[in-house]
Amino acid sequence: MKVKAAILQEFGKPLKIGYVDIPEPGDDESVLIKIIGAGMCKTDIRLWKGEEPREGFRAPFVLGHENAGIVEAIGKRVKGISLAIRSLFMRYGLI
Ligand SMILES: [Zn+2]
């Protein structure tokens, strides 16, 4: 499945709006959340400028780790979450 995202391809340069592949939840513990709102905080700005290097972070990646959405699919081993639950979560996405 492809989703629309603001992609940091080069530190300090404008983000590129594009599409990235995401996996469907399968037999594992993953959850697919349809994003309905995404914020960018000071951490995102520092990461975008390359002022806050973190281990494992390399371009390209998707900024905006403070998100809100609705659970659309869950892995078979997920417990305590059901479809259509509204969710707030924080995560960065390497692509
Ligand atoms: Zn933040």
Image: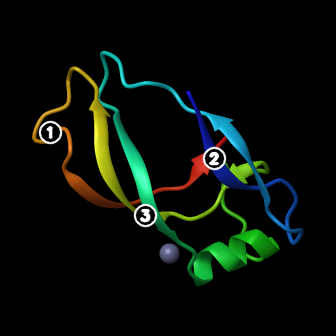
Q: Amino acid at mark 1?
A: Ser
Relative image position of residue 2 (x, y in whole percent): 61, 32
Q: Mark 3 and mark 2 in contact (Cβ < 8 Å)? A: no
Q: Mark 1 and mark 3 in contact (Cβ < 8 Å)? A: no
Residue, disc 3: 67
Mark 2 and mark 3: Cα distance apart in space: 14 Å
Residue, disc 1: 82
Relative image position of residue 72 (x, y in whole percent): 31, 38
Residue, disc 2: 4
Tell me the SS state at disc 2: strand
Mark 3 and mark 1: Cα distance apart in space: 18 Å
24, 65: nearer the viewer: 24
First in sequence: mark 2 vs mark 3: 2
First in sequence: mark 2 vs mark 1: 2
Q: Amino acid at mark 3?
A: Asn
Q: Is residue 12 left or right of residue 41?
A: right
Res 71 quadrant in image: top left
Q: Amino acid at mark 2?
A: Lys
Relative image position of residue 49 (x, y in whole percent): 80, 75
Q: Is residue 80 left or right of residue 92?
A: left
Q: Is mark 1 within 8 Å of ligand 1?
A: no
Tell me the SS state at disc 3: strand
Residue most extreme to the left: 80
Tell me the SS state at disc 1: loop
Relative image position of residue 91 (x, y in whole percent): 47, 56
In the depicted structure, whether residue 66 falls above or below residue 9:
below
